[in-house]
Amino acid sequence: MKRRKAVQLLGASMMATPLPKASFVFIKKEKLGVALVGLGNYATNMLAPSLQETQYCYLAGIVTGTPKKARTWKEKYDIPQKNIYNYDTFDQIADNPEIDIVYVVLPNFMHAEYTIRAFEAGKHVICEKPMGMNAAECQQMIAAQQKSGKLLQIGYRLFYEPHHLAVKAIGANERWGKVKMMESSLGFRMGRPDSWRMKKAEGGGGAIMDLGVYCIQAARRMVGENPIQVTAKGYVDDKQLFKETYETVLFQMEFPNGTLCNASTSFNAYVDRFHTAYEEGWLELKPAFNGGQQPILHGSKNIKISINGNTYQTTAQMDAFVQNIWNKEAPTASGEEGLMDMQIIDAIKASIAESRTVEVKYS
C-alpha cells in the first residue's frame, strides 16, 4: 500500500529539529522514459516495480542479452518492441526519443563502459553503485557526462530516504553536541561462488565494493565531512568460497574534526546498522541500509519517527532525478559523490594491501 510522503519527528526534545526540505520545483507534469540496462535481481525486484509508482518517469525500455527475459518483460510491462535492445544494438538507443534516461544496472566492471556509451547516445544516466571499479573510472565517467551536457545520478537511494534525511538533519544542528563516534556496518551471506560479486575482475573487491559505499556514505553525510585517512584489514575464513575476494573487511575512518567511524562489511555474516554517538546522546538506525526493509530509528532521547512514503526507496530517487533534469540542477547523488566514495574505497584497499593507515586523496 502506498503511504503519504511525510516525515514527523515526535518528542519534546526534538520538536525544534529542522526537517530536510526538497530543493526542487515542480515545473513539468509529463513523464520521462527510463530504459533499464541489465535485468538482474535489483532491476527485477526493485527498479521495475518502483517505476510503476513514480510520478515523473516510467519504464520505457530495456536492454538485455537474454531473449527470454526480453519476452517476459515485454509482456509484463507492455514495452514496445522498438524499445527493447540487446548489448549489440545498445548504441541505437540514441535514435529513440521515447528514452530519456538510461539506468545502468550491470555488474560493476561494466558500469563505466555503458555509462559513457549512454552519454555518447545523448541520454541522461543513472548508474548503480558502486559508480566504477576505481576512482580513475569514475573520473572518466564524469568527463563523459560533462562533455555530453546531460546529467548523471548514482543509484544512492538512501540519499532520498526519509529516515536517513531526518538523522542527517539531527546531526547537522548539533542539538546533542558534536558527533564523537560512529559505527556503520552492513553484511549478509552471499553463498554463491559463481556470482560476479565474488570475482575480483568483475566485482572489484567483494563486500567493500557492494556494501561498503552505504557504510561510508552514512558516516560522511552525518558529519558533513570526508575522512582524511583510513585503516583497514581484510579477512577470509571460508577459503573454499572466498577465493578472489575478502570475506569480511573491517575499517576505520578518521574525519578532520576528530570524529571516528568504525565500519564493517561482509559477504558471510548478517549485520545492518548505523550508530551515532553524540556528546549528549545517541541515535541508531537498525536495520539501516537494506532496500527491502524500512529503517527503524532508535535513540537515547525517546525519539520516534513516523514515516509515510513510497513502497520502494528508489521511487523518490528516480523522481528526484527527473526534477533535476527539468530544473537543470546537479543531483544530490551526483557523480562527484560517487567519485569521493570510490576514492575512499581505493584507500581502504590500499590500507589492506599495505598493512598501514592510508591518507585519502581527493581530486
Image: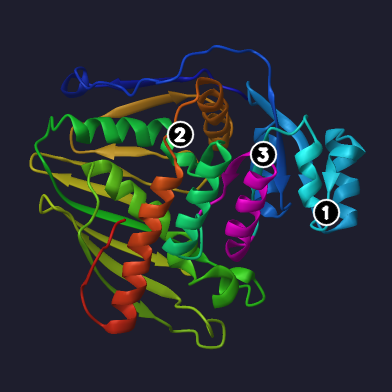
Under circle 3, the secondary element is: loop
The front one of 14 and 79 is 79
The front one of 54 and 83 is 83
Give the quadrant of residue 150.
Answer: top right
Q: Is residue 120 magenta?
A: yes
Q: Residues within 10 Å of mark 2 (few under 14, many from 20)?
A: many
Under circle 1, the secondary element is: loop
The answer to whether 346 is drawn above or below residue 86 in the figure is below
Q: Amino acid at mark 3?
A: Gly
* Nearer to us: label 2 or label 3: 3
Pointers 2 and 3 in contact (C-beta within 8 Å): no
Q: Considering only order in the chain, which callout, 3 or 2, is on the residue closer to the N terminus?
A: 3
**Residue at 26 percent of width and 55 percent of height:** 183
Query: Rounded to the nearest whole Å, what is the CA distance between mark 1 and mark 3?
Result: 18 Å
Q: Residues within 10 Å of mark 1 (few under 14, many from 20)?
A: some
Residue 247 at what x, y percent from top left?
45, 76
The answer to whether 153 is drawn above or below residue 192 in the figure is above
Query: Rounded to the nearest whole Å, what is the CA distance between mark 2 and mark 1?
Result: 28 Å
Q: Amino acid at mark 1?
A: Asn
The residue singled out by tag 1 in the image is: 86
The residue singled out by tag 2 in the image is: 331
Residue 298 at what x, y percent from top left?
29, 39
**Residue at 76 percent of width and 41 percent of height:** 94
Highlighted range, magenta: 107-130
**Residue at 25 percent of width and 51 percent of height:** 226
The residue singled out by tag 3 in the image is: 122
Taking the image as drawn, is residue 121 in sight?
yes
Q: Residues within 10 Å of mark 3 (few under 14, many from 20)?
A: some
Q: Considering only order in the chain, which callout, 1 or 2, is on the residue closer to the N terminus?
A: 1
Pointers 1 and 3 in contact (C-beta within 8 Å): no
Q: Amino acid at mark 2?
A: Pro
